[in-house]
Every structure is written in C-alpha cells, then in structure tokens.
Amino acid sequence: MGDKFKLPGRYGAGEKSVWVEYIQLAAEYKPAVNLGQGFPDYHAPEHVTKALANVTTGENPLLNQYTRGFGHPRLVQNLAKLYSPLIGRELDPINEILVTSGAYEALFSAILGHVDEGDEVIVIEPFFDCYEFMIKSAGGVPKFIALKPKPSEGEMTSADWVLDDKELASLFSTRTKMLILNTPHNPVGKVFTAQELQTLADLCKKHNVLCISDEVYEWMVYKPHKHIRIATLPGMWERTITIGSAGKTFSVTGWKTGWAYGPANLMKNLQVVHQNCVYTCCTPIQEAVARSFEFELARYNSPECYFFSLAEELISKRDYLVKVLRENGFNPTIPDGGYFVMADWTKLGKNLFRVIYNLIIQHNS
C-alpha cells in the first residue's frame, strides 16, 4: 500500500534541500550565522516598508482583496516604465509582463510552460539548485556545463570563471529547447560580458533555442562592471524570457514577489502555468512594490536611487568578507556582482561541510 502513495519518480528521491537543512540549523542553534542563503540582514529602504503599512491600513478595501491574476495593474505599468528604456523597446504591461510569487515561480512557470518530455535544457554550473528539479519535473533532460577558473597567479575574481566555447557548442542539438542563464551569477558572482553573452546568443539563434535569463541580482553589479541584458542583443528579444525580483531589488526577500517579461507569445505559456498554479499574487505587496518603484523612478538619475546605491553599500561588506575568509585559510573568488562570495576550502580538509554541521551541534549541546 505504501508504494502506491510514494513520491512520483519525476521528483527524484525527495531529498531535503540543503537550504532547508541549514536554515533550520541556523534558527535552532544560536549564535550560528546563516551565510549561505540569499537574503540581507539589514533593513529595506524605509519608503518600501512604509508603503506596505500604508496599503494594508489604507482607505481602499480592495487593496486587500484579489487583483488581476497576471499582475496588479499599477505594478506591471511601473515595471514597463522601468524596463522599457533599459531594453530599448516599449514593453506592453498587460501582455509582456507577468508578476509571480517570487522569481522562483517565474522560473517554474517558464520551465513548465515550455519544456516537454525529452527536451534538453542547458544549465551552467554551479547553479541555483531548483533549476535541475524544475527541469526534471517538466520531463526535461538537464545538460550541464561548468564555469571553470582560468589559471591565475594573483587574486581570483568571478571574471576568471569562464565557459569553454567548444564544450558549450557541443551541448546544442535538435533536442535542445532551452538555455538557462544567470547573470549576475549565483554563487560565483560572475557578470557575463558582452562577448560572452554574444556567444550564447549566437548558439541560441543557430539552434532555435529559448533563453531564460535569471537576472534577479541585476542591481548588485560592482563598478566598473555593467549588467547587460541578453534580451537586448540582436535577434534575442523574440527568444528570451527575463526574470527579476522585488525581494532582491528592494531587500525584502520575504515578500516573495517577482516577475518575468518577454514577447507576448512566450509569456502566454507562463500565464497558463501561473493561472492554474498560483492564480494571483498578494495584492497589498504588489501595490507596495509598485509605489516603491514610483519612488525610485522619480529619483532614478540621482545617486540616492536605491537601484544604484545598493551596490555601493555592498562593496565594503564584500571586501570585508573576502579579507576574513583569506585570513582563515580560504581562497575566495571576488565577485563582480550579487551578494555571495564563493571560497575554496579544500586546504582546510576534505569534509569541511560535515565538520561545520557537527560543530554547530556540539557547540549547542
């Protein structure tokens, strides 16, 4: 009887995510610090949190009820205002933007909305762990290619981690449906260059492949590097779905609000998955995010704009963490974007992962 109700094979063995295990440890065993998950320990801008408070207690009762399923009107309009000049085309807020329950759901809807049984999806390693699970859930076959460090005498930066062009080209075939790109990259911190993006774009066009561009760290790019949206490259708009995150943009990851934008014919497929899975997202949070965008768009060309000040605030934190890691025997890669530092710990022992786990338990026993 038990076998009849087991987890379907497409979901694998159903192991706990490493995030589930270590978040629980960090919560249970103080003063353990969770340095692994992508969320800050500082406050969001005051205008952002005040916007939510004002929405929930304001005079309009409808802002606490269901809103448009594919995105609260005020929010999609402001997303169109933000991204239209950045991508060099006028975004249709109704047909080309979808608001999702975090960028996580945008990924899920994009993958489930396009990948069929046996379709191959190219994934760049290392990667956000849900990519593989979502691909397999859709019946797809993940094909992996690793970013590898170039030989370096001095300090290593995320720009030193590159793809092998020949290996990359060999993965594309008639079975390839999709490429998942993450820039700035989690966890390497790599900001893909124009040349690197062009190589990916040329292969996508040659083999008629869809590109899912996960750009949730788009505002966390450290000077002199610049974030380039692959959808802006010639011939890529019509085959690219770009994903963003309010949680990462405004440092409110617990709000779980994201979005995807792209051509209407592709977004239609995401809408089908979304309406039958989530249906609609939290109205007051969408309204608060919309107001937050309006606030920042009004000061977009000033250094105070959070879209630009966020990266400036993070640089000193990045440099301090790199320094501490080096002093303690790690060999860190200095990230050009995002808020992760990837560090080589092999000099410290073969089983550091389990050593840390055991130390947390022992310290609190």
Image (tube, rainbow, N blue to C red):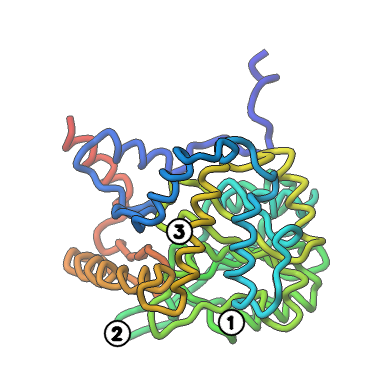
Residue linked to disc 1: 196
| Left or right of 258, for residue 114 | right
Mark 3 or mark 1, which is nearer the start of the sequence? Answer: 1
In percent of the image, x 48 and y 76: which residue is there?
Answer: 191
For the point 36% across and 52% down, which residue is it? 36
Q: Is residue 112 above or below residue 61?
A: below
Residue 9 or residue 68, whichever sits in front: 68
Query: Residue 124: x, y in percent?
Result: 57, 65
Q: Are marks 2 and 3 in contact (CB under 8 Å)?
A: no
The quadrant the N terminus occupies is: top right
Instruction: Note whether residue 144 is visible.
Output: no
Relative to 282, residue 183 above or below: below
Real-space CA distance between mark 1 and mark 3, rounded to the nearest whole angstrom? 24 Å
Q: Amino acid at mark 2?
A: Gly
Mark 2 or 3, nearer chain start: 2
Query: Label 2: which residue?
Result: 154
The quarter holding residue 208 reads: bottom right
Amino acid type, label 3? Lys
Q: CA distance from mark 1 to mark 2?
A: 23 Å
Real-space Cα separation, disc 2 to disc 3, in angstroms: 31 Å
The amino acid sitting under disc 1 is: Glu
Element at badge 2? loop
Residue 329 at least partly seen: yes
Image coordinates of residue 226 in percent, x first then y, are 48, 81
